[in-house]
Amino acid sequence: MKKVFVLLVLLSFILSACAPAVQGLVALPDEARLLVLSLFTAGVTWVLLWLSMRFGVDLAGYANAIAAALAPVIITLIELGLKAIPPAFDNIVLTIIHLLVLLIGSLGAFFLFKRKAPSLR
């Protein structure tokens, strides 16, 4: 019985040593999480304001609660899709995610500056 136990422990160590050491892309970067959360909150707010105008009921107060409940689900689904990407492409995927965050952030800053900037004419 003792030999079988030692053999099982030794076998478990061998199997764990042969397991792949690279886990792959586990989670979205924090910048991408914030981007998804803010875009999703803006989208939910827009939809609820549209529904408020359409049906004549004020639903704008529920936007933050709905976005706070559903945004982690969206982030989890995105992370589930990222886990399907092979570990060899992690750097490329992270670079693309960072570029998307920079692009969307710079477009948002451009349109905000365009709207709020004083006229030089």
Image (cartoon, rainbow, N blue to C red):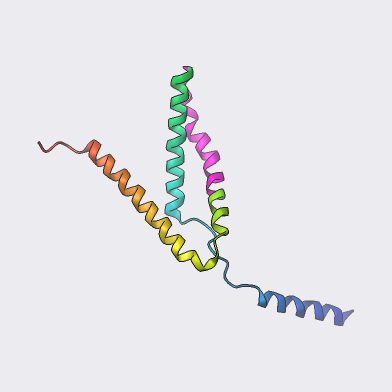
Query: Is 120 situated above or below 99?
Result: above
Nearer-the-camera pick, 35 or 83:
83
Image quarter where the C terminus lies is top left
Instruction: Give me the residue at 52% from left, 43% from top.
Output: 71
Does 81 sit left or right of 45 as displayed?
right
Residue 121 magenta-drawn?
no
Image quarter where the N terminus lies is bottom right
Dominant secondary structure of the residues highlighted in magenta in the image: helix
Instruction: Give me the residue at 46% from left, 57% from top.
Output: 29
Quarter of the image holding residue 30? bottom left
Q: Which stretch did the figure color magenta?
A: 56-75
Quarter of the image holding residue 8? bottom right
Instruction: Give me the residue at 50% from left, 29% from top.
Output: 62
Does 80 sit left or right of 28 as displayed?
right
Residue 103, percent from left and from top: 34, 51
Residue 37, percent from left and from top: 46, 44
Toward the bottom, the furthest residue is 3
Residue 45, percent from left and from top: 44, 32
Residue 65, percent from left and from top: 52, 34
Nearer-the-camera pick, 9 or 26:
26
